[in-house]
Amino acid sequence: MKKGLLILSMIFALALATGCGCAKKDKTEPKVNVNTNKGVIEDKKVDSIEFTKTSLVTVDGVSTLETKVTNNTKEDYQLNAYKIIFKDKDGKEIYSMPGYVGTKIKAGETKYIKSTTNYDVSSAYSVEYEVKK
């Protein structure tokens, strides 16, 4: 009986020392910033390509720009890549990154683009696109 009580006491002491295997969970909420500046979310047109329904969301310093890219012409448009330029309220470039569409956008076709960077551009006042042909 003493041996069983000793073993039970040791298990209880070990459980107390290790926290019973119960880990405290850190419930830190992610820092989310949805950029609603007009210069960011407004529709843009470069050549015959339209960039619409743009959103810029930054979660814990990782920024994601999503936009709808549409060719409203009657001809196919060769658009492999474009440059996304983020600017501050003084019009100075804060950051730029490449955006990729693929090969060409057929006449009347729409593609949805999602570009992500580890650079926090949540303070961007405007976004511009530069088409690379």
Image: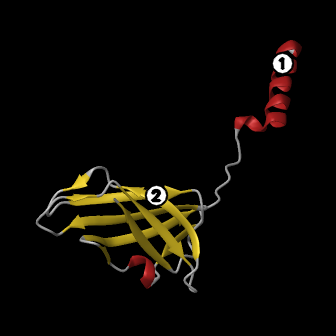
> Which part of the image, by quadrant, shows the C terminus?
bottom left
Circle 1 SS class: helix
Percent across and percent down for residue 12 are 81, 30
Q: Would you call the spot at circle 1 few (<14 residues within 10 Å), some (14-19), or many (20 or more)? A: few
Of mark 1 and mark 2, the one earlier in the sequence is 1
Badge number at residue 101: none
Badge number at residue 98: 2
Residue at x 84% of width, y 35% of height: 17
Select label 1 or label 2 by which is in front: 2
Tell me: residue 63, above or below residue 46: above
Task: Check if mark 1's residue and mark 2's residue have beta carbons within 8 Å.
Answer: no
- Type of the residue with mark 2: Pro
Q: Is residue 29 left or right of residue 3?
A: left
Percent across and percent down for residue 40 are 44, 77
In the picture as drawn, the residue positioned furthest to the front comes out as 133
- Type of the residue with mark 1: Ile
Work out whether residue 36 or residue 101 is closer to the camera in this orientation and state it.
Answer: 101
Work out whether residue 4 or residue 76 is closer to the camera in this orientation and state it.
Answer: 76
In the picture as drawn, the residue positioned furthest to the bottom comes out as 90
Q: Name the residue under label 1.
A: 7
Tell me: residue 48, above or below residue 59: below
Residue at x 70% of width, y 40% of height: 22
The CA span between labels 1 and 2 is 64 Å
Q: Would you call the spot at circle 2 few (<14 residues within 10 Å), some (14-19), or many (20 or more)? A: some
Circle 2 SS class: strand
Residue at x 68% of width, y 53% of height: 26
